[in-house]
Image (cartoon, grey):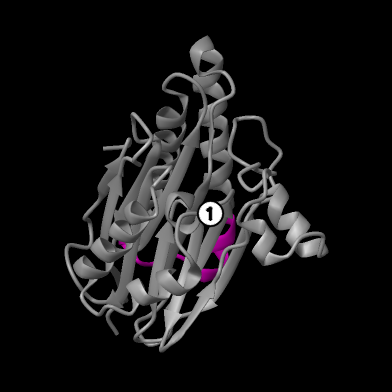
Amino acid sequence: MTASSFATTARSVVGLVRSGNEDSALLHPNLIAVADGMGGHAGGEVASSIAVKTLSHLAPILEKGNIDPDSIEDLLLNTLQDVDSEIGRVASENIDLTGMGTTLSALMLYGPGNDPKVALLHVGDSRCYRLRGTTLTQLSHDHTVLQELLDQGSVTPEEAHEHPQRSFLTQALMGEGPLAPVLMVYEVKPNDRFLLCSDGLSSAISEKEIKAGLKISDRENAVRHLIDAAYAAGAPDNVTVLVADIGQLGDPTSLIFMGSAA
């Protein structure tokens, strides 16, 4: 049976108070990712670009289609270490890039068409959501001080929106290792829709607004709706949105970079 693939529509735009885009994105039929860079000078742009371009080295392996499902975890985690090492190497060669880093949230689609799965690799506070029917589920878990406070019950979700530590990361790819990334595998159902986004979207609009955007059937219109909603909310950060449906569409070797990686 034909293997499933992502049919993805995406945009990456500069926020209303930013001078450049530190987000990067990767679109491939079996691998999509968003990275949100940070660091002085051009550091954020460089770090996020390194993340998605290093991750893209998996594309030729995925295109062969004979990958052992038991190897998926090792493949993704080893690639994540490669990303971190490359960020460290580049930063060590340019003092202006010292301290740069990036988040990374990536989805790999694999398995036969009658039993596809997605593996989510996640570090930082970019996010992954799944819309299944009318149910929106956040699949990723933020690596932030605020999320830890929420998990402990020290702050309420209402208090979280205005919390001064809402953007303090507890984990990011900075070339310093060791990492404790999250890698989760999920079953895929035929009409599942996935959203990968930088926190420029998720920190600007509510989950209810995200769900409303994802329920728009046309992907182009869904992406436009989400970007417009972030802009209407002031878009203090760059906004990157990837909306992916499951299908058997397009060129199996297509590889697109967006944002600073473009």
Nearer the observer, 238 or 209: 209
- Which quadrant is the N terminus positioned in? bottom left
Nearer the observer, 188 or 194: 194
Mark count: 1
Give the residues drawn in magenta, as a range.
63-74
Question: Does the segment drawn in magenta span residue 212?
Answer: no
Work out whether residue 110 can be spotted. Answer: no
- Please identify the quarter of the rendering in which residue 218 is found: bottom left
Residue 256: percent from the left, percent from the top? Answer: 24, 49
Q: Main secondary structure of the magenta part?
A: helix
Q: Going by the image, does 10 lie left or right of 41?
A: left
Residue 107: percent from the left, percent from the top? Answer: 45, 62
Q: What residue is disc 1 on? A: 76
Q: Going by the image, does 68 lie left or right of 59?
A: right
Nearer the observer, 243 or 109: 243
Work out whether residue 114 can be spotted. Answer: yes
Task: Name the residue at 59% across, 50% down.
Answer: 123
* 86 shown above or below 184: above
Residue 230: percent from the left, percent from the top? Answer: 37, 55
**Mark 1: few, some, or many residues within 10 Å (few <14, many ≥20)?**
many
* 111 shown above or below 231: below
- Which quadrant is the C terminus positioned in? top left
Question: Does the segment drawn in magenta span residue 73?
Answer: yes
Q: Going by the image, does 109 lie left or right of 184?
A: left
Task: Name the residue at 22% across, 62% down.
Answer: 252
Residue at the left extreme?
A: 250
Q: Amino acid at mark 1?
A: Leu
Nearer the observer, 256 or 18: 18
